[in-house]
Image (tube, rainbow, N blue to C red):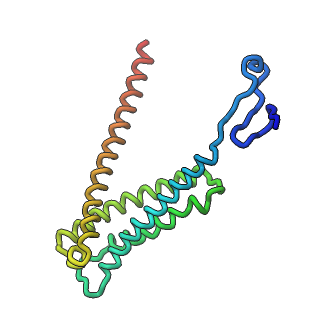
Amino acid sequence: MKSNDNNITKHNIKFKSSKIYSKILKTTEINLPDSKSNNISLNTGFFTILFTLIWNGIILYYLYNLEDESCKCIRDWRHDYMKIIAYINIVLSFIPLIAINIKFNKYFLLILGIIIIILNYIYIYAFYTYIGILNSSNCKCAIVNTPYLNYILNYRRVTIAVVYVLGMITILTGINISFNLHIHNKKFKYNV
């Protein structure tokens, strides 16, 4: 099939360039994702959802195990908060599949992103301190009844803490470098 400048093909879009550049460049192409990259994206989304379901399912199992009537371990706001966030994470993992063609307002997404970040920082604090208290108080329900799961969660809490501290150091270093470059550029601009 013959394709001219106004046709939209399956893998690219062609449009007419301005008259000035028409002698040099007849058409400009914008490559659109093909079916292979869409399959990779869907596979990545599937594994992300699967990981989210498994991880939050493990946390919910661990927390419900601590709710047994015979368990006398500490149970405060962190326990309930971790359960709520685990359920929210499960629901949020399905939103990209459900809302694939819905366009959201960028300010709505920005506010939602900020809220999720704040809730996750509180979650990290709750996770880190709650699992630590269960281990330091030798909670039988956590340490004896689910030893492997307790070990994994304890290892995960330390890993999360290290990653977030390194992330904050990186962010603060980047802000400092950016600020210094801005000041340096101002001085250079006015000195010349």
Horizontal side of 45 relative to 181 (left or right) equals: right
Q: Is residue 192 above or below residue 171?
A: above
Residue in view at x 62 percent, y 54 percent: 104
Residue in view at x 72 percent, y 37 percent: 13
Confirm whether residue 60 shows in the render: yes
Q: Position of residue 150 (x, y in %)?
A: 26, 69
Residue in view at x 23 percent, y 72 percent: 147
Front in this rendered view, residue 46 or 59: 46
Confirm whether residue 85 shows in the render: no
Front in this rendered view, residue 119 or 44: 44
Q: Position of residue 128 (x, y in %)?
A: 28, 62
Horizontal side of 27 relative to 104 (left or right) equals: right
Residue in view at x 42 percent, y 68 percent: 86
Farthest-out residue, front: 1
- Residue 3, quarter of picture: top right
Q: Position of residue 190 (x, y in %)?
A: 43, 17
**Where is the C terminus found, in terms of image quarters?**
top left
Q: Position of residue 78 (x, y in %)?
A: 32, 70
Farthest-out residue, bottom: 69
Front in this rendered view, residue 95 or 119: 95
Horizontal side of 63 relative to 104 (left or right) equals: left
Total labels drawn: 0
**Where is the N terminus found, in terms of image quarters?**
top right
Front in this rendered view, residue 111 or 46: 46
